[in-house]
Amino acid sequence: MKYTILHSFSGVELILKHKLKQIDWKLLFQKVNEADWSKLNDGSLYSVNHWELIKHLKIRALQLTMPQLKNLEN
């Protein structure tokens, strides 16, 4: 059961990161000012954590309700 939850969380996080990439690929980087297309393509980037990911999406495109945010936090 534990692994089911972990894999589900990772899957949701990947879907949200894909949505963020559609908005602006540079937002996937922990440090946006160090965004580099080659690092994104070869996978050597340090990507945003789930808190920053939700914050970027909430500000830019995806409007999450408070219950949805609380579900993501838990």
Image (cartoon, helix red, strand yellow):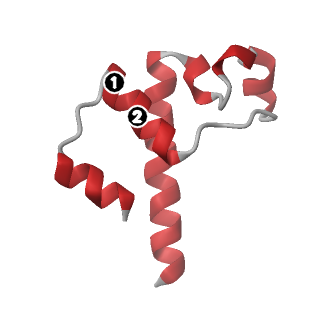
**Residue type, label 2:** Lys
Identify the residue at the far bottom of this view: 1
SS under mark 2: helix
Residue at image coords 48%, 48%: 13
Residue at image coords 43%, 28%: 56
- From this view, report whether residue 38 is shown above or below residue 5: above
Residue 4 is left or right of residue 30, and the answer is left
Q: Quadrant of residue 15?
A: top left
Residue 32 is left or right of residue 71, and the answer is right
Q: Quadrant of residue 25?
A: top right
Quadrant in the picture for the C terminus: bottom left
Residue at image coords 51%, 16%: 24
In percent of width and height, residue 42 lies at 81, 30
Q: Say which residue label 2 marks.
A: 55
**Residue type, label 1:** Ile
From mark 2 to mark 1, how far is it between C-alphas?
A: 6 Å
Camera-side residue of 37 and 58: 58
The disc placed on residue 41 is none
- Disc 2 vs disc 1: Cβ atoms closer than 8 Å? yes
In percent of width and height, residue 41 lies at 75, 25
- From this view, report whether residue 70 is shown above or below residue 14: below
In percent of width and height, residue 65 lies at 18, 43
Residue 67 is left or right of residue 28, and the answer is left
Q: Say which residue label 1 marks.
A: 59
- From this view, report whether residue 35 is shown above or below residue 2: above
Camera-side residue of 45 and 43: 45
Count of numbered circles on the image: 2
Residue at image coords 35%, 56%: 72
- Density class for disc 2 (Cα within 10 Å; few <14, some 14-19, many ≥20) is few
Residue 26 is left or right of residue 8, and the answer is right
